[in-house]
Amino acid sequence: MYAIPLLPSFVLRITKPKRTRLHRQKLQIRAMRAVVQRVTSASVEADGRIVSEIGPGLLVLVGLHESDTDSDADYICRKVLNMRLFPNENTGKGWDFNVMQKNYEVLLVSQFTLYGILKGNKPDFHVAMPPQKARPFYDSLVEKFRKTYNVDAVKDGVFGAMMKVNLVNDGPVTMQLDSSLSSKNRNEAEGE
């Protein structure tokens, strides 16, 4: 019979660090996030005045993660503009047309709070892209939407401002989209 030496418990604690819930959440979040709402109308107000408004279309709240790249922006732009969230009145199909096919508008609003993680009862936004990096990145995302669709059909809020976002949700239809579902990010996660 062989004797197996037992290690003191303090050695086990040193060799296997405890992972906190916040640490696990931070490891899981690696994507640009968009909350897409089908609307009959939406507007953004800043400093007491309306800065952007649309009729029928999509209100898109955009959260930028600290690790986002152009490929994340490409994915979000492509998926949002091609999501078939609008009915076809001729055929009766409920989920048949995208925003471009209907010639509707898109209102983009930067919202770092989409990456809020609660520490107890207090929100922490440490995984959101820092403002000095996020502003040019968000501006390039807005430009990407305008070039892909139509300059006049894509509006946006005021980056970094306190805004009041008004909307009439149509349906209601609300979808959450994360760029981590793109094949590029899935391949990276799988080590390919």
Image (cartoon, rainbow, N blue to C red):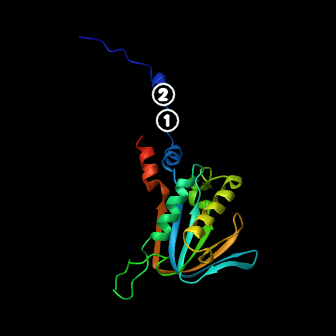
Q: Residues within 10 Å of mark 1 (few under 14, many from 20)?
A: few
Residue 10 in the image: state x and y as whole percent: 49, 23
| Residue 13 badge | 2
Residues at marks 2 and 1, CA–CA distance in whole angstroms: 8 Å
Q: Residues within 10 Å of mark 2 (few under 14, many from 20)?
A: few
Can residue 136 be seen in this snapshot? Answer: yes
| Residue 134 badge | none
Q: Are marks 2 and 1 in contact (CB under 8 Å)?
A: yes
The quadrant in which the N terminus is found is top left
Q: Secondary structure at mark 1?
A: loop
Q: Is residue 48 above or below residue 192?
A: below
Q: Pick whichever, 107 or 20, lies toward us.
A: 107
Identify which residue is drawn at 68% across, 58% down. Answer: 136
Q: Quadrant of residue 157?
A: bottom right
Number of numbered discs overlaid on the protein picture: 2
Q: Secondary structure at mark 2?
A: helix
Q: Pick whichever, 139 or 111, lies toward us.
A: 139
Kind of residue at disc 2: Arg
Instruction: Report whether 43 appears left or right of 35.
Output: right
Q: Pick whichever, 158 or 184, lies toward us.
A: 184
The quadrant in which the C terminus is found is top left
Q: Pick whichever, 44 or 58, lies toward us.
A: 58
Identify which residue is drawn at 42% across, 46% down. Answer: 187
Identify which residue is drawn at 51% across, 42% down. Answer: 20
Identify which residue is drawn at 49% across, 35% down. Answer: 18
Residue 98 in the image: state x and y as whole percent: 45, 75
Residue 35 in the image: state x and y as whole percent: 52, 67
The residue at which mark 1 appears reads as 18
